[in-house]
Amino acid sequence: MGYFGVQFCGSSIPVGAGSALSALAVAFGEEKGPGSWDRALYMDEAGFTNVILVAYWKSPTQFQAWFERWATGWTRDGVAGISAGTFTEIVRPSVERFETLFSSDLTEGVARVSAGLSNPVREHGYWGGARDRMAISQTDTLLPSSVLKVVTTGRHQRVIAHDNLCLIRSGQDWRATEGAERRLYLDEVEPVLRAGMDFLRDLGLSVGCFVNRYMTVLDDAGELTEKRFGMSWWRSLTALERWAECHPTHLAIFAAAMRYLTTMGAAAKLRLYHEVTVATAEQQSFDYYNCHPKTGLLRAMPATE
């Protein structure tokens, strides 16, 4: 799973950054490129615009071969120009270290490179279900080890991860909704969801969330779509579970979603999904070039003079 980002001030993407993203999209179509990828946009807490290409490979070996040929320079001089920053957040989880779940048969994310969907699962509808859907949880508590560290060389910064860092991508697709259902989602559910995403973006460190991005998916022409997803890195799966089960911001999201689903019942056309990954330190890499100091996992670094 590769997150390739560019970061810049303002709403107009710099020429160099736009060219870099276009070249990367072309490279995705080369031999051993990803089986699926998305383009998404969000405004971070420092006021910078971030455009991220999110890509999925079936095989870490195929990814590495592609990456070494096409993307090793993504976080180096000259890729996006001096007015933009670039970053990569890469995770190579073994199958037993991630799970994904859908409210319909429309797939997103990692499921798009799978052979298909399973039958409905029993491990659903209760706090802790995500952990139970991961095979590794049968033999591992998935507790974090050590702390994050950063190595800085000029304008390049590499974050050294600890074991069992947790990644979640949780998405909403309301393209098929109409009339009363659309109004119910956009007026009563989405604002509560956004408030929770903003809390994690701005104050997430207090609950173990290193960084949160509430992103809007872009179409092939770069236009906003009616699809969003929250994407966040957590110190541990335990921290994510505690926020989901106990924190007022998530309880408000859960309550709004239950009112929505109770009202709409089986007629609901809103599509929901998520994927959760808990990776070892060796399965992760984080590189940032010319980015502001609160970008991604840099946000979790202690302040220095």
Image (cartoon, rainbow, N blue to C red):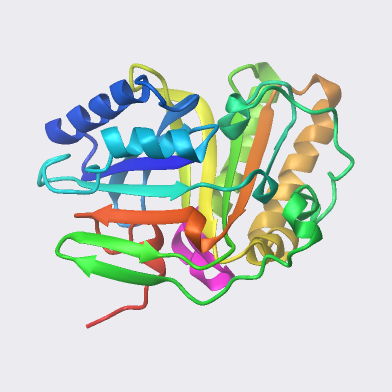
- Residue nearest the observer in this picture, 103 or 286: 286
Numbered range of the magenta stretch: 198-211
| Residue at the image position 28 percent from the left and 34 percent from the top | 69
From the viewer's perspective, is residue 141 above or below residue 16?
A: below
| Residue at the image position 26 percent from the left and 62 percent from the top | 157
- The quarter in which the C terminus is drawn is bottom left
Q: Position of residue 67 (x, y in %)?
A: 34, 38
From the viewer's perspective, is residue 133 above or below residue 203?
A: above
For this view, does 280 lie left or right of residue 153? Answer: right
Q: Position of residue 134 (x, y in %)?
A: 74, 50
From the viewer's perspective, is residue 257 above or below residue 206?
A: above
Q: Position of residue 147 (x, y in %)?
A: 48, 75
Is 209 included in the stretch rendered in magenta?
yes
Quadrant hosting residue 289: bottom left
Q: Is residue 14 visible?
A: no
For this view, does 24 lie left or right of residue 228? Answer: left
Magenta: main secondary structure equals helix
| Residue at the image position 65 percent from the left and 16 percent from the top | 178
